[in-house]
Image: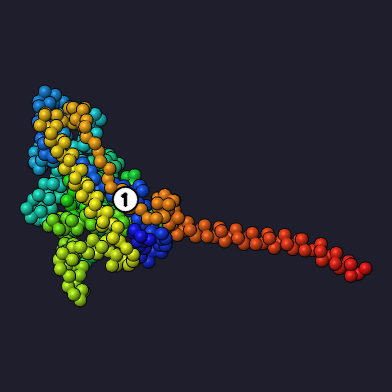
Amino acid sequence: MKFLPAFVFLLTATPLCACLWDRDTIAMEAQGRLEVVETMVGWFDRFPPEYYQMRLDRVTKEIGTTPERLELYDDAAVACDRLGRHDDAVAWMDRKSARMAALPPEQTTDHRYRMHANLGVFRTHQWIKTLERNAQEEKLKLAIEEVKTALEINPNAHFGRERAHLALLEWWQAGLHSPGMQEPLYDSYQLLRSVQADFPNTVDTTSSNLVKGYCGLIQMGSAQDSLDVHFLVSWLLMNDRTPQGHRDSHFALCYLTCLRMTELIKEGREPVYAGKDLHDWLQPEAHFKGSKVPPTREEMLERLPLSLSRVGIWGGSGDQSAIPLWFHQARAAARQRLAAKTAFMQQRFAKGMHPDTHTDFWNGWEEPQMPEVPRTKLEQRVGVPLAAWLSDYSHVGLVVFALAAGGVVAIYVILLVRRKRARPLISADARAECA
């Protein structure tokens, strides 16, 4: 096929369904997983500091006149956190807690959940920003306890982002106690183990749901530049289960994620996870040690996304060039969109307008379309859903079996009809001879 290769990952002796006709294409994988595509190319909103400063100024005044409005404390705290003032964010939650103390518990259930969920984020940021954070595990434990408390109050809120957040924090904590892990990839099973053990009654603790949760952390949280979160998305995609129930990888989505990871590596981002092996594994030099002719660092970075997606381990062949070409095109369009939308917002801010207070704030903004993902010839001819169905080997096997069975039945019927037609002729001839 012209666009993207079909890859079958051999995971621990589990037999996998074979794939035909470039099953793992961006177009097919994006069906129901568009959040991964949008997340990796950066096609989501990020607001400038003015957005949060104007909100903070407004709600601070409103709290002065209506201190009983508990939701205002959340607005003020989150605005402070977005502005990098994490200690102030925690202080706003302390003020909210004091205000709730005089109210009956049954009236504050939702607000208690919001408070602990927010504190989980604020405590996480405090720990990450701490110098020598790996020696400050107590701060990490505080963040974990806040997220657990929020989940105990509302275990299925935020579309799984809290479960993903908890799994991330406990994975980081595991890295503090096992810095010598020989294979950081497989240590990521801690993600599923921890969530399932702590909160077995949550709606969905599958790897697919965690992917959605981490995409939410990137889009709506502060993980846009987190190597750790992008790594975990790629790892979970490698080990996700398709709707058909086969343990297939999502090669194209994983490759997109690794292309984004390489961008972060080029920018000098470092992982938070304390294990040394993960830090080493993210270095380009670690993937080309056996090269007879050592490539330059630029060449290594060019080839790194494919290596990070573990094609070298699992095998595969074909032309992967369509994926990075489309990725860089979409990334450029996403940057252009963000710059245009930021400029639009800042013009409105200068006039004293804000989305919170002006219903016409977005009048005049025209949302651009994300570049269309490439499709194979089969997808173009029959559509993505039918191409995805046809590319499932089990479906093709059923079709072949049905056609073969139909052919056998047809041949049997034809032979039976011919035999019945031949019998009277034979009997007539025999009677003539006897006469």
Q: How is the image coloured?
A: rainbow
Q: Amino acid at mark 1?
A: Val
Q: Residue 266 at x, y = what percent?
A: 15, 58
Q: From the viewer's perspective, tell me whether residue 22 is left or right of residue 282.
A: right
Residue 360 screen position, x and y as percent: 21, 28
Taking the spot 68% from the left edge, 59% from the top edge, the residue there is 413
Q: Residue at x 34, y 44 (%)?
A: 203
- Dividing the picture into quadrants, the one containing residue 101 is top left
- Direction from residue 330 to residue 247 in the image, left or right: right
State the residue lying farthest toward the right: 435
Q: Is residue 172 visible?
A: no
Figure quadrant of residue 17: bottom left
**Above/below status of 192 relative to 428:** above
Q: Which quadrant is the N terminus positioned in?
A: bottom left
* Residue 154 visible in the displayed image: yes
Nearest the eye: 230 or 109: 230
Residue 272: x and y, percent?
15, 55
Furthest-bottom residue in this view: 292
Q: Residues within 10 Å of mark 1 (few under 14, many from 20)?
A: some
Q: Position of residue 269 (x, y in %)?
A: 13, 56
Q: Which residue is mark 1?
A: 373
Q: Is residue 11 left or right of residue 118?
A: right
Depth check, front residue: 177 or 263: 263
Badge 1 element: loop
Q: Is residue 396 above or below residue 143?
A: below
Residue shown at 43% from the left, 57% from the top: 392
Q: In which quadrant is the C terminus drawn?
A: bottom right
Please say if 115 is above or below 411: above
Nearest the camera: 433 or 355? Answer: 433
